[in-house]
């Protein structure tokens, strides 16, 4: 078992901040393994009928728990009223440290009647980040490692397998439907929903327009928007909003949608191997996961103007800070500064970053006449977390 030290430290920090921590993440992202690695963890698997019966009276159950260590409630959304138990724990047993895991955010209204605002910390466990790859493959070369990560994806079981099979992906999708979608949402048409999921996987990273999906799924535009909300709530898709400073030339509302994992995107597109174009496209996903692994979802957006100039990601690291413009390319030689130049004419000031699979870094370079910070995906977080003054030559 590979210990995900970055995430374990994040859990410990959140437990110091709140007595209840909610770990959300897609199925097989490693939530149970992470929770078990918490020192003193006492795990209760809520998928077991015996455990659900034991937790039926939340107050009695919590009174029986020792104060030392950490109480882990795995797959808590299987309970009939999970938010009630967590609310009681936060309000009446603050001396207990409680970690709950589930495959959705707390906005799955069918089960979570209370989002526990102010009572809990939330942690989104992402697929294996680029910075974690050396822990999983300590003796492999960097090119071999990132190729495997892009092609196999970041769910630990898929990443570590010699070659994920079609049946593995189909089994995951069936489990997602049965254990997440059906239990937590009202969806009448299984076939339409699964067609929509497959289309999102194939077109991941593109601009989203609901009417485009309505015809192949044979449902209304309103239903497509409901499906997208379900994918967003289950963290199976990320809806990325455009960044705008108010200029009439900028897109202001149309989102981009990214699927949750590079391996599933590669599988849905039928790629037997990765071209440079496919590598660049999947690198965007890996970079987005890095950004979401270190900053809130609202801090990350994309930029595009009506002339179709675009910057892959815009990051606002903190309130009142300059924004970072981030471009992703399979190779540094493929970087075209046109999008970044157009963005900086409207939004001067801030760090310009190019992430490429062949980049060493972090390193300042002059590309296409523009001075940018270049870095590979494994050192991206390191580069962005340093103060800009520390990046000067």
Image (tube, helix red, strand yellow):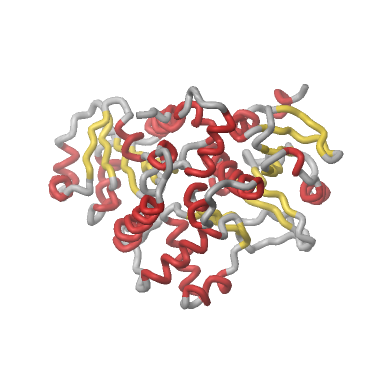
**Image coordinates for residue 56, horizontal then vertical, percent:** 16, 50
Q: Quadrant of residue 391?
A: top right
Q: Nearer the viewer, residue 316 or 380?
A: 380
Q: Nearer the viewer, residue 119 or 54?
A: 54
Name the residue furthest front: 272
Instruction: Note whether residue 123 is visible.
Output: no
**Image coordinates for residue 118, horizontal then vertical, percent:** 41, 45
Q: Residue at x 76, y 43 (%)?
A: 335
**Image coordinates for residue 137, horizontal then vertical, percent:** 47, 28
Instruction: Note whether residue 280 is visible.
Output: yes
Above or below residue 73? Residue 110 is below
Q: Residue at x 43, y 27 (%)?
A: 5
Q: Nearer the viewer, residue 167 or 113?
A: 167
- Quadrant where the N terminus lies? top left
Q: Residue at x 26, y 41 (%)?
A: 73
Total numbered labels: 0
Q: For this view, does 17 lie left or right of residue 392?
A: left
Q: Residue at x 22, y 47 (%)?
A: 46
- Quadrant where the C terminus lies? top right
Q: Quadrant of residue 322?
A: top right
Above or below residue 116? Residue 229 is below
């Amino acid at each position: 078992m590979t210990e995900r030290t970055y995430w374990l430290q994040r859990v410990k920090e959140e437990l110091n901040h709140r007595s209840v921590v909610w770990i959300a993440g897609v199925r097989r992202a490693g939530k149970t393994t992470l929770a078990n690695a918490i020192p003193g963890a006492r795990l209760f698997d809520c998928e077991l009928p015996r455990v659900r019966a034991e937790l039926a009276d939340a107050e009695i159950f919590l009174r029986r728990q020792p104060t030392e260590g950490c109480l882990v409630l795995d797959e808590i959304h299987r309970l009939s009223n999970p938010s009630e138990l967590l609310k009681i724990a936060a309000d009446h047993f603050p001396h207990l440290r409680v970690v709950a895991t589930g495959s959705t955010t707390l906005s799955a209204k069918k089960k979570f009647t209370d989002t526990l605002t102010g009572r809990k910390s939330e942690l989104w466990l992402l697929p294996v980040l680029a910075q974690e790859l050396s822990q999983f493959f300590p003796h492999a070369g960097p090119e071999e490692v990132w190729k495997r990560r892009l092609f196999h994806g970041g769910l630990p079981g898929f990443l570590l397998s010699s070659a994920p099979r079609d049946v593995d992906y189909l089994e995951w999708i069936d489990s997602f439907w049965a254990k997440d979608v059906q239990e937590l949402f009202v969806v009448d048409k299984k076939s339409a929903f699964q067609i929509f999921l497959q289309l999102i996987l194939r077109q991941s990273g593109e601009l989203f327009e609901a009417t485009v999906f309505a015809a192949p799924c044979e449902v209304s535009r309103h239903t497509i928007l409901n499906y997208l909300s379900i994918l967003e709530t289950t963290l199976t898709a990320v809806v990325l909003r455009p960044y705008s400073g108010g200029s009439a030339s900028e897109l202001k509302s149309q989102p981009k949608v990214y699927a949750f994992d590079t391996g599933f995107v590669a599988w849905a597109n039928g790629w037997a191997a990765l071209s440079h174009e496919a590598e660049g496209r999947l690198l965007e996903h890996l970079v987005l996961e890095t950004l979401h692994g270190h900053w809130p979802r609202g801090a990350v957006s994309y930029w595009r103007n009506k002339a179709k100039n675009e910057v892959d990601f815009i990051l606002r690291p903190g309130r009142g800070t300059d924004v970072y413009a981030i471009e992703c390319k399979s190779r540094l030689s493929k970087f075209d500064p046109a999008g970044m130049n157009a963005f900086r004419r409207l939004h001067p000031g801030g760090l310009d970053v190019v992430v490429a699979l062949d980049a060493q870094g972090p390193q300042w370079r002059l590309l296409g006449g523009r001075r940018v910070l270049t870095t590979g995906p494994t050192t991206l977080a390191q580069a962005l977390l340093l103060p800009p003054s520390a990046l000067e030559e």
